[in-house]
Image: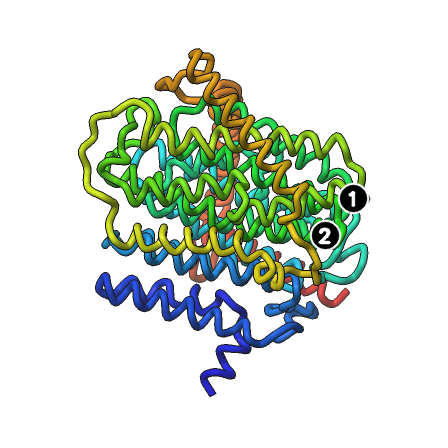
Amino acid sequence: MLSDLLISMPPGFMMMLAALPIMALPHHARQVAMLVAIGASAFSLTAGAGDHWIVSLMGFELILYRADHLSLPFAIVFHIAATLNVFYGWHEKRATDHVAGIAYAGAAIAALHAGDLVTLFIWWEATAVTSVFLILASGTQRARRAAMRYLIVQVLSGVLLLSGAAMLFSQTGTLEFAAMELGSIGTWMVFIAFGFKAAFPLLNGWLQDAYPEATVVGTVILSAFTTKLAIYALARGFAGTDLLIVIGCLMTAFPVFFAVIENDMRRVLAYSLNNQLGFMVVAIGIGTELAINGAVAHAFAHIIYKGLLFMSMGAVLYRVGTVKASELGGLYRSMPWTTVFCIVGAMSISAFPLFSGFAAKSLIMSALGYKGLVAAYLVLLAASAGVLHHSGIKIPYFAFFGHDGGHKVKEAPFGMLLAMGLASVLCIGIGSLPGLFYSILPYSLDYNPYDASHVVGQLQLLIFSILAFTFLMTFKFYPPELKSTVLNTDWLYRRVAPVIGRPVLAGVMAVWRSFVVALAGYRDMVLDTVEKVMHAPIAGPTVPGKAVMIQTMLLAIILAVGYLVAG
């Protein structure tokens, strides 16, 4: 039966299969077909926990479909994000975003259900190959360069993953994707591979470099899957690794300063995304059941509210043509619904009570408190205040309020408004009904975020952060919004690498050309000598010298292979 076939298929696989055929469909039929494919993929989740598709290939046992308590919440929110993206991009008649988006989402969902490292690698690389088209679709020179840099980093991550998997197999005799401990070269390679996709410090430049260069729809899609897939992989493979606490604290802290001075609003959100990933990484490093629940809850909520913020800025870019803070302002008059939805996203990411960020972030802060990690707690507390500044206040203030940019535009298209409206409902629903939200988390949880200490403490943080922002703006201490390009670790390969690499590459190519010329000279000399010998008068029919030499070489190769096989 069809239902049995769908249940046995890995979730996301149906979305991958549907990607190319939908390209040939008319626009509205294409959107409907994508929703059907997402629904079929979601139906596969009803198979429940367990290993549902195991394949033996060349002596290896590959688990193509494994489901458990950790994969389920990620799978749910990935399907939600894919659905919202279909609605958000309904106005876009060009097929590129839709085909790449549905394939990318499908690959990410399939990767969640990989039970072995080889299957994970296949889908890991599939996310890279499919997502790069969302950046290339912008069609600008900046986008093309950013896309190539993005692809190099993502493929490098996959190469590290596969190399680490090979080393682990040689040591343990298994490819199962399970908990690992840092200690061998193989586990370190897998760890760094995950770190690239999770945008660890010094490995994060690709995120701020590439995401803002994607199309209006593409940036929203990109924000949902790649980094959260890495968070899932870290939670499965390296939960309880103390090093992640240090890495996560750095991730929460350093993007705040870049976000404050950045002028491009989508780039601000990219820095903010990096900051929010840090909270999840810290929770995974703690490794307790409460902390893992917090990491998963935060990833779930973050996909929705960060997608909502990217949607709102995408709507502004679609109508105004720019998301530079220095060129915006006053849009609340012409885009009132987009303004409201942006504020909902801003309040969610800032963890206001009754919004999703509060329900998720409270779990992580409590896990830190129970473990007595005071220094990490203070770092995340300060980072929370920074989040309010650069995403909670800066995004809505400079885009929709602040000075009047003089733009008289239409409200966002209906599909955009529908997607933003649904995301807003989810943000408020998660924050208002946390018990229902907690029921899908990996571990059973008896937790109430709305006790006096949590609510009062968070409100104090928010109120003082708002007062600080008001003070800085009133007395003109806040960094002005300037037309500029802010570089972070991508400076290493956007500025330093070309300066150093081009002369080195030119030298290597010069040596290579000399080697090829010399080799060609020796080849011609040998061929001329053989040809002279072969042209000597002999009885009977003759064969051209080059043909004889080629046949002789082939015979020698056959004899050598035969000797090795016989030996």
**Amino acid type at image mark 1:** Tyr
- Residue 427 shows which numbered tag? none
Q: CA distance from mark 1 to mark 2?
A: 10 Å
Q: Is residue 54 left or right of residue 22?
A: right
In percent of width and height, residue 369 lies at 75, 40
User: Is residue 510 visible from the viewing direction of this image?
Assistant: no
Q: Secondary structure at mark 2?
A: helix
Disc 2 residue crowd, few under 14, some 14–19, many 20+, Cα 10 Å: many
Mark 1 touching mark 2, by CB under 8 A?
yes
Q: Residue at horizontal 62%, vertical 38%?
A: 456
From the viewer's side, name the closer residue of 34 and 130: 34
Q: Which residue is mark 1?
A: 370
In this picture the colour scheme is rainbow
Q: Quadrant of residue 85?
A: bottom left
Q: Is residue 179 above or below residue 523?
A: below
Disc 1 residue crowd, few under 14, some 14–19, many 20+, Cα 10 Å: few
Q: Secondary structure at mark 1?
A: helix
In percent of width and height, residue 324 lies at 33, 27
User: Is residue 88 visible from the viewing direction of this image?
Assistant: yes
Q: Which residue is mark 2?
A: 290
**Amino acid type at image mark 2:** Leu
Q: Residue at horizontal 67%, vertical 30%?
A: 379
Of labels 1 and 2, earlier in sequence is 2
